[in-house]
Image (cartoon, rainbow, N blue to C red):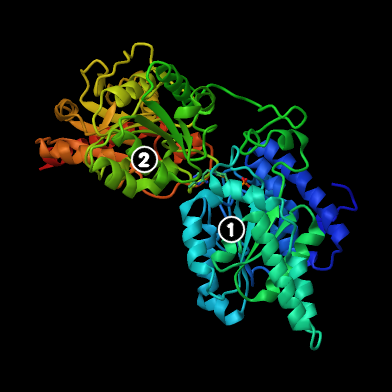
């Protein structure tokens, strides 16, 4: 940053108020540079953030935060907002342990008015804030910034439907860049593309308001003009009022979302309305960084990368890739097999499937609820639908899995990606609740592979050899350690070790690797343990419980929520079976904040080192107790 940097002078949004539009433009360029630098180091949501720089600058120059409020939908585009709201000097810590979050966080700043991470919540949340006591009292404005991708989520319409005629100081900014992560889909996307070619008519409206004030002729002329305008809209766009006006919003736009002058004048006009307004802006995802402009899909969310080439600093094959490959192989032989994504075809490994089997690939938009019910419909019609979804987003589909699939015993397959700790995206994105909520439902089988080969076996079993709902869950990233002498099998459970031990570790999924490494640490210290690896985690295999019963101490290690998780159920069944030893459960009982996955696992007591410590310490504590008891007996 040069000496004449404007950004260095910004300590709070108030500093923007004195700047000219030209200075705000220059400031935007400086912010862009910082974003590219930081994301190239820390990874993050690059293209979305580059697209909203001018919007963010304009918003902070027109509104008074924290008196006014902004709710960022998904929240992945909040980097410029963070830079402008007193967090400039810490922006290089974004998405790191103890650093700034990559999403808005109320606990982080008074300028963040609502935590986001999952899509399509902004309108409901902003409307709630606009109705709340504090905003009512102070007459403040609440602004929701929502992307066209997030507008494919049903919740956004529930918000629009409820808020439109409320008369509240609510402004919804529709950031339309034609993209979700991939190209946006659905009829609303088509509708928006038709609106994009429509000339902005805010200025026409403002002029009509002025015209109205001319004595005698003003009102009739305005009426005539309005009729002409409506006729034009009707003729060219097939509707008297657009959909947002039907919802009760005043509609302004579309505007060039990179033109600060236009943006500021639209925001000021919206402010004067004192009732719900929707401002439609067009932006370019990746704006200002050529590689991202050309290829916004690949630069939506990125690991650290080389700025000159755009290449990731490291990459390796992950579970999602393997999942996509197998699905393509089987789809070539079976026309019933189809794939569904809720706007996540790239992340879930379905890119090739989407190209090869266009007629059996369904991108339903950011609509996880719809995806499950739609899959259930396909299954009712005889297809075999596989819904590939991140664990965290499947949380949205609880009722649909239960009501539309499980209770009807329909055969749908849930390919649950990013199961377990996910790392830098933090608490809103951890895949640690799916096991607990699926555990509550009937007619569901859940498989948990620990390596690529097992993913193949259990995915196949889920598709072709399981009744009702079949779920296969696998983590972010690639394979971890599997000992050479471990025999991979598609049995529901495996007992690993020489069986001479009286201590048993029980686990599943990626945590198996940690337990194997812990077993080796303990073995080198002369402590023998066995491992019971569950491949089917729901229902818990009866044989697995019987195998565990003969051990003196059982330790269950679970990379998932403790409450309602498999560890809890296993312990219950074990004691029900008459087990009289010690049962210890290590699982997750609090939100897990952003950090590298290994660091989180360590802090949660779930990495090999902590697992070995726990067992070693328990043994030492047991021996101490024995010594005290025996010395007490002697001294009596
Ligand atoms: C419920 C849910 N499903 C999926 C996602 C993953 N996701 C994050 S951003 C995004 C696309 C958002 O597109 P848009 O709202 O247009 O914002 P843009 O990135 O284009 O600015 C998706 C699908 C999510 N955050 N929440």
- Name the residue rendered at 55%, 79% in the picture: 136
Q: Would residue 126 appear left or right of 178 to someone viewing this image?
A: left
Whether residue 190 appears in this view of the structure is yes
133 to 407, vertically: above or below: below
- Name the residue rendered at 71%, 47% in the picture: 51
Q: Residues within 10 Å of mark 2 (few under 14, many from 20)?
A: many
Q: Which residue is mark 2?
A: 560
**Callout 2 secondary element:** strand
**Callout 1 secondary element:** loop
Q: Quadrant of residue 470?
A: top left
Q: Extreme right residue here?
A: 4
**Residue 108 numbered mark, or none:** 1
Q: Residues within 10 Å of mark 1 (few under 14, many from 20)?
A: few
Q: Extreme bottom residue here?
A: 215
Along the line of sight, the residue nearer the viewer: 486 or 375: 375
Q: Would residue 292 appear left or right of 604 to someone viewing this image?
A: right
Whether residue 13 appears in this view of the structure is no
Going from N to C along the chain, the mark reached first, 2 or 1, is: 1
The x, y position of residue 326, in whole percent, is 43, 19
Quarter of the image with the C terminus in it: top left
Give me the C-alpha separation between circle 2 and circle 1. Answer: 26 Å
Label pair 2/1, CB-CB below 8 angstroms:
no
**Residue 606 numbered mark, or none:** none
């Amino acid at each position: 940053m040069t000496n004449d940097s404007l950004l260095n002078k910004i300590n709070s949004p108030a500093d923007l108020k004195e700047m000219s539009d030209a200075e705000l433009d220059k400031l935007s360029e400086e912010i862009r540079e910082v974003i590219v630098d930081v994301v190239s180091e820390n990874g993050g949501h690059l293209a979305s953030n580059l697209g909203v720089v001018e919007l963010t600058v304009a918003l902070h120059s027109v509104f008074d935060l924290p008196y006014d409020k902004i709710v960022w939908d998904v929240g992945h585009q909040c980097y410029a907002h963070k830079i402008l709201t007193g967090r400039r000097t810490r922006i290089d810590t974004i998405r790191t342990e103890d650093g700034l979050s990559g999403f808005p966080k109320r606990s982080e700043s008074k300028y963040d008015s609502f935590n986001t991470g999952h899509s399509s919540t902004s309108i409901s949340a902003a409307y709630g804030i606009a109705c709340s006591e504090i905003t009512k009292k102070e007459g403040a404005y609440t602004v929701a910034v929502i992307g066209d991708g997030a507008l494919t989520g049903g919740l956004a319409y529930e918000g629009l439907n409820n808020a439109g005629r409320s008369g509240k100081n609510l402004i919804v900014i529709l950031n339309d860049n034609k993209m979700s992560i991939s190209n946006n889909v659905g009829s609303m996307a088509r509708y928006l593309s038709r609106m994009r070619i429509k000339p902005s008519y805010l200025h026409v409206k403002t002029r009509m308001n002025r015209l109205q004030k001319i004595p005698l002729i003003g009102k009739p002329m305005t009426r005539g003009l309005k009729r002409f305008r409506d006729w034009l809209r009707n003729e060219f766009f097939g509707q008297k009022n657009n959909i947002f006006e039907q919802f009760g919003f005043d509609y302004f736009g579309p505007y060039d979302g990179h033109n600060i002058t236009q943006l500021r004048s639209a925001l000021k006009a919206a402010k004067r309305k004192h009732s719900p307004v929707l401002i439609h802006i067009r932006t370019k995802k990746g704006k200002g960084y050529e590689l991202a402009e050309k290829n916004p899909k690949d630069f939506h969310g990125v690991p650290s990368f080389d700025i000159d080439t755009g290449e990731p600093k490291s990459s390796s094959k992950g579970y999602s890739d393997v999942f996509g490959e197998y699905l393509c192989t089987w789809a070539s032989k079976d026309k019933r097999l189809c794939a569904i994504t809720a706007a996540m075809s790239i992340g879930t490994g379905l890119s090739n499937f989407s190209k090869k089997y266009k007629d059996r690939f369904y991108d339903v938009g950011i609509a996880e609820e719809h995806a499950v019910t739609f899959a259930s419909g396909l299954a009712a019609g005889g297809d075999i639908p596989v819904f590939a979804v991140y664990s965290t987003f499947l949380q949205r589909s609880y009722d649909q899995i239960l009501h539309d699939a499980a209770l009807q015993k329909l055969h749908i397959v849930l390919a649950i990606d990013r199961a377990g700790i996910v790392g830098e995206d933090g608490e809103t994105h951890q895949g640690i609740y799916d096991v607990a909520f699926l555990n509550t439902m009937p007619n569901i089988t859940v498989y948990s592979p620990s390596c690529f080969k097992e993913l193949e076996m259990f995915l196949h079993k889920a598709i072709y050899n399981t009744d009702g709902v079949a779920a296969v869950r696998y983590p972010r990233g690639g394979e971890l350690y599997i000992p050479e002498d471990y025999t991979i099998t598609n049995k529901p459970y495996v007992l690993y070790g020489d069986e001479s031990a009286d201590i048993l570790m029980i686990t599943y999924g990626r945590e198996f690797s940690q337990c194997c490494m812990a077993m080796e640490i303990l073995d080198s210290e002369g402590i023998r343990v066995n491992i019971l690896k569950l491949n089917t985690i729901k229902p818990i295999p009866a044989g697995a419980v019987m195998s565990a019963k003969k051990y003196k101490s059982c330790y269950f290690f679970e990379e998932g929520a403790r409450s309602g998780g498999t560890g809890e159920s296993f312990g219950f069944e074990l004691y029900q079976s008459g087990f009289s030893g010690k049962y210890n459960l290590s699982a997750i009982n609090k939100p897990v904040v952003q950090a590298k996955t290994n660091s989180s696992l360590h802090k949660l007591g779930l990495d090999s080192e902590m697992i070995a410590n726990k067992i070693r310490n328990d043994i030492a504590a047991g021996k101490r107790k024995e010594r005290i008891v025996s010395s007490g007996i002697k001294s009596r």
